[in-house]
Image: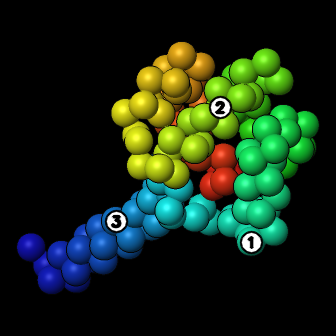
Amino acid sequence: MNKKIIFGILGVSIFSFIFASKTLAYRGNPNVYGPNYTPERHEAMTKAFANKDYNTWKNLMGDRPITQRINASNFSKFTQINQLMLEGKVDEANKLRAELGLGLGLGRGGQFRNSYNYNK
């Protein structure tokens, strides 16, 4: 096979791996920030979760798909998921996610993403 073709395929493969790794890295991991992370938004989200302030959270989220699942009545459970993830209690968080219908392939990417990092 021609060396140019081999190196071209190798280059595209490496580029794809790097791009996909950075794009997918933040999903569900509160220690990895999404591509649109800002300190201001993170602070606002932190306050919204700490105060269980659904309206502030909803305004920050805009029209993202998760707002179709999370509402004022189940937001306190959603804040529990966030806290459990921050504590590293993934299994417990996943149980609550299932109760809320999150992570069932019903949103972009089919995976729950921590709201700090849930960016368009």
Residue 90 seen in the figure:
yes
Which of marks 2 and 1 precedes in the sequence?
1
Q: Position of residue 94 (x, y in %)?
A: 44, 30
Residue corresponding to mark 2: 78
Residue 1 left/right relative to 106 = left
- Mark 1: few, some, or many residues within 10 Å (few <14, many ≥20)? few
Which disc number belongs to residue 39?
Answer: 1
Residue 120 left/right relative to 73 = left
Residue 12 seen in the figure:
no
Q: Position of residue 117 (x, y in %)?
A: 63, 55
Which disc number belongs to residue 17?
Answer: 3
Which of marks 1 and 3 precedes in the sequence?
3
Which of marks 3 and 2 precedes in the sequence?
3
Looking at the rendered structure, the kind of residue marked 2 is Phe
Labels 2 & 3 near each other (Cβ < 8 A): no
Looking at the rendered structure, the kind of residue marked 3 is Phe
Labels 3 & 1 near each other (Cβ < 8 A): no
Measure the alpha-carbon separation of dots 3 and 1: 27 Å
Tell me the residue at 46%/66% (across/down). 22
Looking at the rendered structure, the kind of residue marked 1 is Pro
Tell me the residue at 52%/24% (across/down). 96
